[in-house]
Image: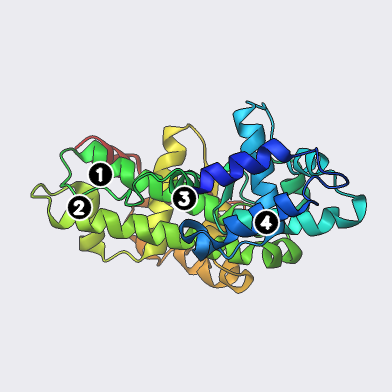
């Protein structure tokens, strides 16, 4: 029986010693194919070329390289320039499958080339044979601060999902699949909060407010973002919030309804549009949470 990490270790030892690309001998080729067929990684549908990339990352990780970039990977693979673009696409797919990880969310080819890469924690746990069920048993909330921190984690995930999505149409098209995956992570976190709330006896102000006003998800995101901005002593404009809650370019227009004078958050005084006199609402209008609402939600 072959363990995934053992195969990667064998391959990493052979890197750079086999001719033009480091993976051209029958020995390395067979090891790459063997890794692809392991049941632990079968769901990822890897190719031998993908495995060669992973072997390099494995080798560089344990060599404690300070920076593992796409260019360094291709350099260690001894690839010719003609196939560099192909391998950038392969790395992009490995990021998409959550086999590799980078802190950058806008996965354009330029950003991938210049990003630090590492193994995704879930994939690393899988190939090391650690317990795959990393889900924690559902426990009730003990404190309001714990409950609100989970919601602030939601808004961080939502910001990650929408990072740079609307810079231009090309960027949007390149990253829509990644945004969808990140949005699914947001939904999972929200479901987890709901499960914990259902078994929590104490009633927290934000949960009560959601029920009282029957907020939709966009209204929740707006409030959370404004709370977060106050905590870091920053502000949001209408344009920023529209990007946060929209999933496509038409949404940037249609979701303006959340910021007119009859909108639920505005009409009920939960958020404040920073206008003077008869000033019209624009994309540059600053929006803030009502300080009394913020205090109520955070200090219970």
Q: Nearer the viewer, residue 50 or 180?
A: 50
The percent position of residue 71, horizontal first and vertical second, equals 79, 41
Q: Quadrant of residue 17?
A: top right
Question: Could you give the CA–CA distance between mark 3 and mark 2, rounded to whole angstroms?
Answer: 19 Å
Asked if the residue at tag 2 contacts the one at tag 3, i.e. Cβ–Cβ closer than 8 Å, the answer is no
Dot 3 or dot 2, earlier in sequence: 3
Dot 4 or dot 1, earlier in sequence: 4
Graded by Cα atoms within 10 Å as few (under 14), some (14 to 19) or many (20 or more), the crowding at tag 4 reads: few
Asked if the residue at tag 1 contacts the one at tag 2, i.e. Cβ–Cβ closer than 8 Å, the answer is yes
Residue at position x 63%, y 45% in the image: 104
The residue pinned by badge 1 equals: 147
The percent position of residue 88, horizontal first and vertical second, equals 76, 54
Dot 4 or dot 2, earlier in sequence: 4
**Residue 30: assigned label:** 4
Q: Nearer the viewer, residue 28 or 272?
A: 28
Judged left or right of residue 161, residue 266 is: left
Question: Could you give the CA–CA distance between mark 4 and mark 1, rounded to whole angstroms?
Answer: 50 Å
Graded by Cα atoms within 10 Å as few (under 14), some (14 to 19) or many (20 or more), the crowding at tag 1 reads: some
Q: Quadrant of residue 66?
A: top right
The residue pinned by badge 2 equals: 196
Question: Could you give the CA–CA distance between mark 4 and mark 2, rounded to whole angstroms?
Answer: 48 Å
The percent position of residue 84, horizontal first and vertical second, equals 84, 53
The residue pinned by badge 3 equals: 157
Question: Could you give the CA–CA distance between mark 1 and mark 3, rounded to whole angstroms?
Answer: 16 Å
Asked if the residue at tag 2 contacts the one at tag 4, i.e. Cβ–Cβ closer than 8 Å, the answer is no
Between disc 2 and disc 1, the foreground one is 2
Asked if the residue at tag 4 contacts the one at tag 3, i.e. Cβ–Cβ closer than 8 Å, the answer is no
Dot 2 or dot 1, earlier in sequence: 1
């Amino acid at each position: 029986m072959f363990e995934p990490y053992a195969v990667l270790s064998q391959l990493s030892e052979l890197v750079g010693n086999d001719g033009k690309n480091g993976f051209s001998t029958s020995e390395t080729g067979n090891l790459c194919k063997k890794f692809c067929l392991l049941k632990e990684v079968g769901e990822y549908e890897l190719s031998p070329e993908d495995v060669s990339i992973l072997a390099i990352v494995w080798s560089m990780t344990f060599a404690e390289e300070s920076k593992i970039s796409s260019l360094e990977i291709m350099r260690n693979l001894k690839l010719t320039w003609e196939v560099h673009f192909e391998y950038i696409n392969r790395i992009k797919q490995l990021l998409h499958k959550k086999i590799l990880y980078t802190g950058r969310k806008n996965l354009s080819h330029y950003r991938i080339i210049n990003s630090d890469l590492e193994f995704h924690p879930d994939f690393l746990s899988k190939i090391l044979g650690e317990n795959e069920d990393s889900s924690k048993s559902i426990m009730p909330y003990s404190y309001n601060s714990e409950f609100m921190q989970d919601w602030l984690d939601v808004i961080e995930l939502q910001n990650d999902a929408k990072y740079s999505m609307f810079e231009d149409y090309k960027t949007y098209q390149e990253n829509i699949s990644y945004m969808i995956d990140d949005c699914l992570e947001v939904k999972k976190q929200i479901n987890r909060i709901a499960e914990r709330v259902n078994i929590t006896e104490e009633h927290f102000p934000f949960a009560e407010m959601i029920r009282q006003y029957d907020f939709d998800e966009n209204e929740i995101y707006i409030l959370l973002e404004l709370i977060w901005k106050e905590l870091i002593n920053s502000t949001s404009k209408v344009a920023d919030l529209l990007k946060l809650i929209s999933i496509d370019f038409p949404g940037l227009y249609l979701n303006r309804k959340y910021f007119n004078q009859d909108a639920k958050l505005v009409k009920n005084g939960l958020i404040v549009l920073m206008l003077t006199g008869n000033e019209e609402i624009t994309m540059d209008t600053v929006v803030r949470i009502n300080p009394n609402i913020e205090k109520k939600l955070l200090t219970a």
